Image (cartoon, rainbow, N blue to C red):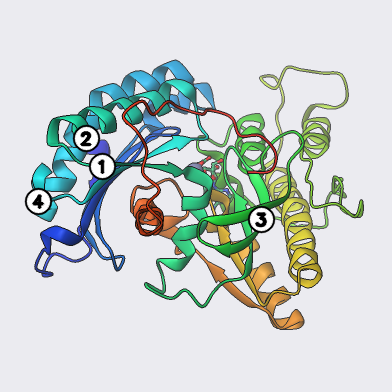
Amino acid sequence: MSESIVSSPRSRSFATDPDRVLLAIESTCDETAAAVVTRDGRVLGECIATQEKLHEQFGGVVPEIAARAHLQRILPVIQTAMQQADVQGHDLQAIAVADRPGLAGSLLVGVVAAKSLAMAWDRPLVAINHLHAHLYACQLSQPGDESVYPAIGLIVSGGHTTLYRCDSPIDLVYLGGTIDDAAGEAFDKVAAMLSLGFPGGVEVSRWAVKGDPTAYDFPRGKRNDGTFDFSFSGLKTAVRYAIVGPGRQDFSSIEISDQVKADICASFEAAVVDVLVRKSRRAVKQNRVRRLLVGGGVAANGCLRRELAKAADEDGFELVIAPPELCTDNAVMGAIAWKQIERGQFASLELDITPGLQRGF
Ligand code: KG4
Ligand code: ZN
């Protein structure tokens, strides 16, 4: 396990103020993470245990394997983050945990760990919405800067593709989201079809650089439908047809050249980015806001970052994207819990998980 744990103290020299630190725990999908963060967004301790190697052979996250791995890692990960920060349980102002949305078994491990520690150390508990936390990661590049609101928030991750109007880090109004696959899920599936490895997003974008984005005219689901919803399943099917042809399921006997692979990746990436950029800039315009916040694993994608920057330039809005290391799942973005603490939004020790979210959250 040790080789998969990455811990990176970002502020070791800072003298700990025991009244101003909280422990944040993240276990919604396949990263087990803990961080000790100050009220003003400094990271005193951080530890992430990744599970990529465990899921690689399946081409996607296997929920039962993820839950079991979280169980083995959660306490060492928390311990590492707290040791780095040089804090004890009684130093913490609160314990925050992502309780929604995510894989049920994965969420359960984090929530039960947080509740147990809150009880043992007699500390208050804060329940974090993982999607709101992904958007809060944008703000962590500009600590303490509340001037980014109101804004449109775009979350593009392995499980979600959602647009919100954000009036504060914790006041979000749902505008639209995917009606089938998430953008990151589509990247992962395309990578699996082309045997590019897991997680697929990084691999597909690496191949896309060598390809022609106009080689295939892949469908742009719901591009012009006037809503803020997304659909990527038709695109996924079109990629499948481009690889094996209609009606065939078996990828094992297919041999395609590296150039065709690269062209498929580039054309697929262009189709995803096209719809994400188009709907985001329309949301900014229609809501008359001046900023777009973008978070989630797919926000690390270079092509998306470039095209959004171009759109921001043309339309005259400010683009705030989470730094690449805070796009994928981490516990540092759990610093959003401070905003909930300011409002007195604490959870009870009866806290339960909420794996799925209803439209509107
Ligand atoms: O936010 P995240 O870590 O987990 C969820 O909350 O789902 O996002 C993971 C997703 C995966 O689907 C991964 O393939 C995708 O983000 N991803 C990328 C890139 N880096 C990660 N997709 C496209 N381009 C990337 N550079
Ligand atoms: Zn996530």
Residue occupied by mark 2: 118
- Which amino acid is tagged 4? Val
Marks 3, 2: nearer the viewer: 2
Q: Mark 1 or mark 2: name the one nearer the start of the chain.
A: 2
Residue occupied by mark 4: 87
Cα distance, mark 1 to mark 4? 16 Å
Q: Mark 1 or mark 4: name the one nearer the start of the chain.
A: 4
Q: Is residue 284 left or right of residue 349?
A: right
Q: Mark 3 or mark 2: name the one nearer the start of the chain.
A: 2
Q: Are marks 1 and 2 in contact (CB under 8 Å)?
A: yes
Q: Position of residue 351 (x, y in %)?
A: 39, 29
Task: Say which mark, if any, is on residue 124.
Answer: 1
Q: Position of residue 245 (x, y in %)?
A: 85, 27
Of residues 224 and 194, which is closer to you in this image? 224
Cα distance, mark 3 to mark 2? 31 Å
Relative to 105, say whether 13 is above or below.
below
Cα distance, mark 4 to mark 3? 36 Å
